[in-house]
Image: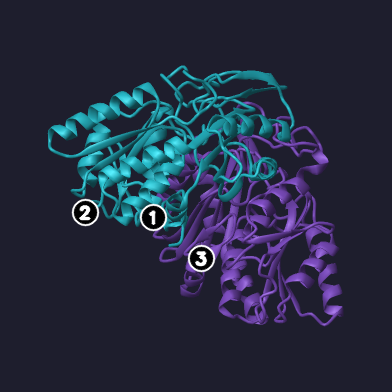
Chain colours: A cyan, B purple
């Protein structure tokens, strides 16, 4: 296993320590239970936005804590759901008195553990709304989910809802907004190579030298189809087609186009994919009004790409453009 | 070869097309000769800052074109120097009448071709200053260089000089500043895996499953030593030690600590490296006043990390903090 780590069992702890040392002006890190929270929390009168999930998808979620995005993120072990006490303690720490929004990716473990934390908090009179992100069009059910998996739209929901909370949206309106983002976002990914969970020490799956997997999940879960590697244009066409047809996105729509590296795929390839995606959208009369290109929801060192499209209206565009300052996403400030 | 590309010979062209389609508000792309330039160029009365080099190190340099950083970047083929006509035409396009600063990494081909372009421009009465970046402490001479290679400090010089040009530094003062950044910056890198140049179709070198290379160059050039893989803490110690001793950085110094992924190494590992680096610096009484952590000067999909330290004074801190808006680096705007 070729990784820059010390002991496999210390990967998450030491990486969080590094994050805290690097960005003391933005975040603090709590251990046992593990969560990352805004250095200036709680922000009085603001709804606190909290997400979390297995580690290994960085910068999501711990790299998205800060002004204009998350108040706290709860990282589980690599590709493992966080436990309810993480979300419970994080919520207690960042609660500004206006309630808590949980943004939860649709994986059975995450759903169950966020729900338990929500019940504990509600028992103490803290208002909690949970919104499930299930935007992956690749498969209807999968290894770790009932229903669709939550992938790229999560990043967009965290940015947009974080901005709205900063603007003063109340809990009910914020939860409605998050549901709108989820209902307007669609994603699909693919992998050229697998990745290795440190504790396992070997790749999560195998792909032959000439093979790729279309519709893969962010934990390496099986997707739609394994096939011989095709060209970047053909791959982009396959992903874009599935995403566009699903909503469907239509001529006249404005979208945010999000081209995401699964981790190991470099910029030079991401822009080749973006090029084709842009051309496909243009041909269909769909306007790219905003874009995000880079590594935002990853699967460790996996090589591959995912495409997310989010339909935009004026509200979403304004919230997308609002200032954000986190270790993993920053502009306007 | 597992890559998201179409034809190997179209990689650079199509990736640049994607960059131009993605960021029309920031950059324009010229083909034949290839260069990327600020959408609002020329900026009258401002020194134009231009860099360039082989492709495959993205976001450096083409991703650093925009407000507060580069006026133009000239990308060669993957790991191949750009030709003089690229720099010549780019300079003509972005010349705002206050002269041109070339920031050149110390590789023989780059040096020669930037020099030829400078001579052509000077022949037309355009003032040009060239500053060489040679910050890599790993080896004294190498495969493609006489003297030290130019690596991580290049990114920092482009940010800092871009900000200074925006602030109105004249050409002479800007060149002095760039030399100061180079003289105060030191770097060293390592690789866990090689990378594959698309046109070659096979890895640039081989490393056994249990081997790493310390002091590697950004084109996979041999470094100081090949050895069995060590822990992240030991690797960080080796890199940091070599960098710190070289300047040397001393107790009381303030530094910018830059932990850079060679491409394939994910955030979760970068922060484990940052953690140890921060601890080492703290023990030595060296204060991390600024930091940069991510993928900024890469070697395609290579797994590995480089550490750059830059000594800071008030001038450099202020210029580092100044607003920047490019596809690859953005804050404050």
Taking the spot 75% from the left edge, 52% from the top edge, the residue there is B54
Taking the spot 32% from the left edge, 54% from the top edge, the residue there is A166
Labels 3 & 2 near each other (Cβ < 8 A): no
- Closer to the eye: label 2 or 1: 2
Measured in 3D between alpha carbons, the distance from the residue under mark 3 to the one under mark 1, in whole angstroms, is 15 Å
* Residue nearest the observer in this picture, B137 or A89: A89
Q: What label sits on residue B28 in the rendered view?
A: none
Which chain does the numbered disc 3 sit on? B
Earlier in the chain: of badge 3 and badge 1, it is 1
Instruction: Report the side of A14 relative to A196 (left or right).
Output: left
Mark 3 and mark 1, same subunit? Answer: yes
Percent position of residue A302, x then y: 57, 31
Q: Secondary structure at mark 3?
A: strand
Instruction: Report the side of A82 relative to B232 (left or right).
Output: left
Q: Secondary structure at mark 1?
A: helix
* Residue nearest the observer in this picture, B126 or A307: A307
Which chain does the numbered disc 1 sit on? B
Q: On the image, numbered disc 1 is attached to which residue? A: B282
Residue B35 in which image quadrant = bottom right
Is residue B262 placed above or below A299 in the rendered structure?
below
- Other residues around mark 2 within 10 Å, as few (<14) / some (14–19) / many (≥20): some
Quarter of the figure that contains the N terminus of chain B: top right
- Other residues around mark 1 within 10 Å, as few (<14) / some (14–19) / many (≥20): few
Percent position of residue A207, x then y: 64, 19
Is residue B254 placed above or below A86 in the rendered structure?
below
* Residue nearest the observer in this picture, A267 or B208: A267
Q: What label sits on residue A45 in the rendered view?
A: 2
In this view of the protein, can residue B105 be seen by the observer? no
């Amino acid at each position: 296993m070729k990784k820059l780590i010390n002991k496999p069992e210390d990967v998450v702890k030491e990486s969080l320590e590094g994050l805290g040392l690097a960005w003391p002006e933005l975040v603090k890190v709590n251990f046992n239970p593990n969560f990352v929270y805004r250095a200036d929390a709680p922000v009085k009168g603001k709804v606190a936005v909290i997400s979390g999930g297995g580690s290994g998808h960085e910068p999501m979620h711990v790299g998205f804590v800060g002004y204009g995005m998350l108040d706290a993120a709860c990282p589980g072990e690599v590709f493992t759901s966080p436990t309810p006490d993480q979300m419970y303690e994080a919520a207690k720490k960042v609660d500004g008195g206006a309630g808590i929004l949980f943004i939860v990716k649709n994986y059975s473990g995450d759903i169950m553990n966020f729900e338990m934390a929500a019940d504990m908090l509600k028992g103490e009179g803290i208002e909690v709304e949970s919104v499930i992100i299930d935007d992956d069009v690749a498969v209807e059910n999968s290894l770790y989910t009932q229903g669709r998996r939550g992938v790229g739209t999560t990043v967009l929901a965290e940015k947009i809802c974080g901005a709205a909370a900063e603007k003063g949206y109340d809990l009910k309106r914020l939860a409605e907004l998050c549901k709108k983002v989820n209902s307007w976002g669609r994603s699909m990914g693919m992998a050229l190579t697998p990745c290795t969970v440190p504790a396992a020490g070997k790749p999560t799956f195998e792909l032959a030298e000439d093979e790729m997997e279309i519709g893969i999940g962010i934990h390496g879960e099986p997707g739609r189809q394994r096939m011989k590697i095709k060209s970047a244009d053909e791959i982009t066409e396959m992903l874009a087609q599935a995403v566009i047809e699903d909503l469907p996105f239509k001529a006249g729509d404005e979208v945010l186009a999000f081209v995401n590296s699964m981790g190991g795929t470099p910029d030079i390839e991401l822009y080749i994919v973006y090029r084709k995606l842009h051309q496909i959208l243009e041909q269909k009369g769909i306007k790219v009004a905003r874009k995000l290109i880079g590594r935002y929801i990853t699967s460790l060192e996996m090589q591959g790409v995912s495409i997310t499209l989010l339909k935009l209206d004026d509200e979403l565009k304004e919230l997308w453009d609002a200032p954000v300052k986190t270790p993993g996403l920053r502009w306007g400030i």
